[in-house]
Amino acid sequence: MPPKNSNAQVATEEDVSAPQNITDGGNYVENLYFGVELNCVPDLVTQLEEYRREFDFITVPLAHPRNERDMSEGAIVEEEPFARSDMLLSSGQWGSLIIGKISPWIDLDSKDVYNRKNSERVLLQELSWASHLNLPALILPTPTHNSTNYAQVVNRKLQGLMYMNLWMRVPLMSTWQMLHDDETQITFGDNHRATQDPWEHWNTFRTLCEHSDKLCVALELTENVPHERVISRWLGEPVRAVIIPTRIFTTNKSGFPVLSKAHQRVLQMFFKYKIQYILSGPARHKNSFVPYRQYVQFLYSKSPQPTYDESFMTPYLDYLQAPLQPLMDNLESQTYETFERDATKYQLYEDAVFECLTDMKNGGKLEGRTHIVLMVVGAGRGPLVKASLRASVRAGCPLKVYAVEKNPNAIITLKNLRISMNWGDQVTIVDSDMRVWNAPELADVLVSELLGSFGDNELSPECLDGAQRFLKGEPDVWFVRLTQDIEGGISIPASYTSYLAPISSSKLWNEVRAYKEMKHYETPYVVKMHNFYQLGESQECFTFVHPNRDEYIDNQRYINLSFRATQSATVHGLAGYFNSLLYGSVYMSINPANHSPGMFSWFPLYFPLRDPMYVAKDDVITVHMWRNNNRVKVWYEWSIVSPQVSPIHNVGGRSYWIGL
Ligand SMILES: C[S@@+](CC[C@H](N)C(=O)[O-])C[C@H]1O[C@@H](n2cnc3c(N)ncnc32)[C@H](O)[C@@H]1O
């Protein structure tokens, strides 16, 4: 049982690597959004002007940090205002350049009733003032393992917030975690360790606050760095800012501030997210914050730049999309255009057809014949027809092609292609649903791409079961099939398997919640997951093989899968992926374990949970998943039954189904 901070790393002088002159770093693609935390602000206007030359914003206390005012009932009302006037800055400046900070001394869970009540009043007063100023964000003091009353007051206020977000200041490691090595921590037991874990404090607080999307995290780096797994858990949390204390920097030979390799790695993990960076503490180097900023900016410029494909995907990050229904609906030109940009996918198909035709040729299938009959079923605007013809030339194996498509609009494109590409008699275009088409001859090869992000979720099994009637060796009368040569025709893909894994993603869950309707919690969404953390490797879910030679074809499925939590976390749903064997040695996968490099046609599927579920370290997360059908539709139902029991989602396909 590895403890939470196993492999903790402490910054040392040796692992510091940095340029001698950071201004030579160059090569910035985009600047990080940087601010400075100030604790003493006697002249807001002048200080803002000064810092604005080098920084994007400043964070300032709303009241003087030592102004422990008495706000109890009957207390003498102070003449002095507790905060500076809002007239010092324009509302535009307050709303974009200033992040507020709540007084650090308040203690809403104090055993002392006076102190508790006074703290409540001060917190409400400062929250109200920050809303009045229309600040973009307000930093809240760090919660402890006992912050229930603090959460109650914040939660009340969260209900009415419109523009402003609350950023909870959370350290990456607690002092206790930094003081105790892995072995010693174990001896304290799980419960004690949880009381010392800042993530647990945050998790309890946000759970009390109903997982509000207005409550976010300002993660403060600490002298020590925990195991990478512990940092990864924050990638599923709404981290809006990383606070970098100046005390964690060391000095290189030229006198510039630099960070240890371990700290650099933490920052590299967050550079992928659009968040703010805040320098805090006194400027110890050259008496200015600028070298710190330049150094972090330098690290950013040295981090891997997004590839062309990654840049292309930026608008889709964490953006929920309803899955396509290519069987029930007719896809639009724009959708086909997006598919066709994915050169990798068509190259994989070309390679699969090439391997298949080569095997057929070498296996004597061409003997006594002029060509192989290949049918592209669900041809769309023709990219798989083109890929198959390219493979035929490569393999030196002549083809006769049928392009079967049920979308009448795509048929127009196919007919035009037939003319412009001079396909002539080599390609026959068929305007029909493959499930009912009466083919004039049998096919040696059926090529299709009817796959969804979860493999079978665009009804490839049902379509191909209908189409295999016209595949060689697959007559539609089952008792005849028994007497046939089952070495007959080939389907590309030969099989596909879906995969599942529990994930933590406050972001995705809140996106679903924003719809304010139960049915959305029961709808799987296609989404390029970004602000998420996956609790373990994905596991195999449902497999379909084509042609399907079962005596009775049954496409219903049911499985349960168990995952062991390597650390405590909050589960917000499941991630779904697929892997497909196209033919021979050619696979096509979006499963993270073996994702086809460069392929972007499919984003994962997100199956939400109605309520986020806390799981403790070493808990077994048991997931149940069903694929059900009736004469008109197919649907999934899902549930987690341990460590807690969720309702079964999407009973009878009441919220989401795929039309047959
Ligand atoms: C995901 S698209 C793939 C299109 C194209 N093969 C490609 O790779 O770009 C699936 C295509 O199959 C068609 N399709 C789906 N079910 C079908 C059916 N039962 N019969 C014929 N075409 C079907 C859809 O209209 C759509 O054009």
Image: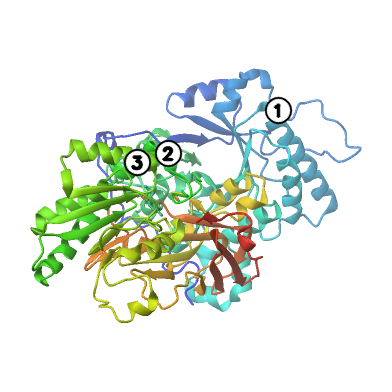
Q: Earlier in the sequence, mark 2 or mark 3?
A: 2
- The Cα atoms of the two marked residues, 1 and 2, are separated by 33 Å
The vertical placement of 214 against 128, above or below, is: below
Element class at badge 1: helix
The amino acid pointed to by label 3 is Ala
Which residue is rendered at x = 54% and y = 68% of the image? 625
Q: Earlier in the sequence, mark 1 or mark 2?
A: 1
Q: Position of residue 149 (x, y in %)?
A: 76, 53
Tell me: is circle 2 under 8 Å from ligand 1: no
For the residue carrying disc 1, how many other residues have a C-alpha within 10 Å: few (<14), some (14-19), or many (20+)? few
Q: Position of residue 632 (x, y in %)?
A: 55, 58
Residue highlighted by disc 3: 410
The nearer-to-camera label among 2 and 3 is: 3
Tell me: is circle 1 under 8 Å from ligand 1: no
Specify the label residue 132 is tagged with: 1
> Looking at the image, how many numbered discs can be counted on the residues?
3
Specify the label residue 315 is tagged with: 2
